[in-house]
Image (spheres, grey):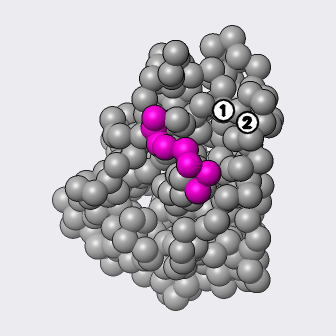
């Protein structure tokens, strides 16, 4: 008996389009919809027995995390894993679905749930190959988060990383800062590239030509192809000392996460400079970190739980035939006032 996946392949349309059409056969308003129904009839689709329940396999959604983008140690740390789980489950549980979490390794071996096909939808984070997408993900309803691949014809939810850069530079500019540096140690990552581009655009929008000497940007070494989670705060003393001892050093740094912020602050303290009295720091984090009462940083909230929730809602809408295909949703980051930003000294 034909299912919606086979019908979609035959019709050359998405599973969501077939699902939506077959749920509403009494309202066929386009020639494409009528063609899908004719193909379904020819393939032996059982219209009498169909129901929302028969199309659901196990009431399970899988979140796929790609280790080529986020190491398992980093993913399963509390400040990443809990925002993912909380963000997705607060949506899918309302619809009666459970969450399965799985990793895709460097060899792209599919997790058992994809091989058994005992899931109803996929939310994925990271750089999947086109081969993996076609073979294992495309036949399920799916949504990608953060790492948009324009070659994949699917829905996406991600942070507006350029807006993040604008928010950081704008706040620093309002406090009198003009020499603002950028600190990142994984510039190969497309999310970091977007944030750096946002920083550059924001600086120029403020009438400032950014000086490369204000920033420290490099690629931290991968181990066996995976960028490891930093077990301790790294030593940035040499990098920061080189920047700060220039004739016109930066008065503020935009750091891409709190590990880099901590390393930058430690390096400044090692040369007897105080944060924020001498140098301000603005970092990036999520609300899991902000909720920590010891969190001191002035920060932009990357809203990762909200990104996961929006992806889950988009997936639920797709499964239920309520969403237009090819949606790319950008979430605007939020601002958190902390204790590491001060006006520039006169």
Front in this rendered view, residue 84 or 148: 84
Say the numbered circle drawn on residue 226.
none
Helix, strand or loop at mark 2: helix
Q: Answer above or below: position of 304 versus 299.
A: below
Front in this rendered view, residue 100 or 234: 234
Quarter-of-image position of residue 220: bottom right
- CA gap between label 2 and label 1 equals 6 Å
Q: Earlier in the sequence, mark 2 or mark 1?
A: 2
> Where does residue 141 sit, x and y in percent of width and height?
48, 60
Let me know if residue 110 appears in the view. yes
Asked whether disc 2 touches disc 1, contact meaning CB atoms under 8 Å apart, the reply is yes
Q: Residue at x 37, y 34 (%)?
A: 335
Q: Residue at x 54, y 74 (%)?
A: 232
> Where does residue 38 sit, x and y in percent of width and height?
54, 51
> Where does residue 218 sit, x and y in percent of width and height?
77, 55
Q: Is residue 230 magenta?
A: no
Q: Which residue is mark 1?
A: 250
Q: Which residue is mark 2?
A: 214
Q: Answer above or below: position of 157 versus 218.
A: above
Q: Which residues are magenta?
A: 270-277
Q: Which residue lies most toward the front here? A: 272
239 relative position to 123: left or right: right
Q: Residue at x 34, y 40 (%)?
A: 338
Most frequent secondary structure within the magenta stretch: loop
Label 1 Cα neighbours within 10 Å, binned few <14 / some 14-19 / many ≥20: many
Front in this rendered view, residue 19 or 269: 269
Front in this rendered view, residue 236 or 313: 236
Helix, strand or loop at mark 1: loop
Q: Answer above or below: position of 265 versus 161.
A: below
Let me know if residue 117 appears in the view. no
Q: Answer above or below: position of 269 versus 42.
A: above
């Amino acid at each position: 008996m034909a299912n919606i996946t086979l019908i979609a392949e035959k019709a050359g349309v998405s599973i969501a389009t077939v699902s939506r059409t077959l749920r509403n056969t009494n309202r066929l308003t386009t020639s494409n919809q009528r063609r899908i129904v004719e193909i379904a009839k020819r393939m032996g689709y059982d219209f009498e027995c169909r129901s929302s329940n028969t199309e659901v396999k196990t009431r399970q959604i899988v979140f796929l995390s790609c280790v080529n983008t986020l190491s398992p140690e980093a993913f399963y740390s509390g400040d990443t894993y809990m925002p993912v789980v909380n963000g997705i489950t607060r949506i899918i549980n309302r619809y009666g679905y459970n969450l399965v979490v799985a990793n895709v390794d460097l060899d792209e071996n599919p997790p058992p749930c994809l091989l058994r096909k005992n899931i109803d939808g996929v939310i994925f984070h990271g750089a999947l190959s086109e081969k993996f997408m076609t073979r294992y993900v495309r036949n399920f309803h799916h949504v990608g988060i953060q790492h948009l691949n324009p070659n994949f014809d699917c829905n996406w939810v991600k942070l507006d990383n350029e807006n993040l850069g604008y928010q950081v530079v704008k706040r620093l500019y309002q406090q009198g800062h003009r020499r603002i540096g950028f600190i990142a140690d994984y510039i190969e990552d497309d999310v970091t590239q977007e944030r750096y581009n946002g920083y550059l655009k924001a600086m120029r929008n403020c009438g400032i030509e950014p000086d490369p000497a204000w920033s420290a940007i490099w690629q931290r070494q991968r181990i066996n192809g995976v960028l490891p989670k930093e077990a301790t705060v790294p030593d940035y003393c040499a990098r920061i000392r080189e920047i700060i001892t220039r004739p016109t050093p930066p008065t503020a740094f935009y750091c891409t996460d709190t590990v880099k912020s901590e390393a930058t602050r430690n390096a400044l303290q090692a040369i007897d400079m105080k944060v924020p009295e001498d140098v301000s720091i603005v970092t990036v984090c999520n609300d899991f970190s902000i909720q920590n009462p010891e969190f001191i940083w002035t920060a932009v909230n990357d809203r990762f739980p909200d990104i996961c929730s929006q992806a889950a809602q988009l997936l639920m809408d797709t499964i239920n035939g309520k969403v237009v295909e090819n949606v790319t949703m950008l979430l605007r980051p939020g601002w958190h006032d902390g204790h590491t930003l001060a006006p520039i000294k006169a």
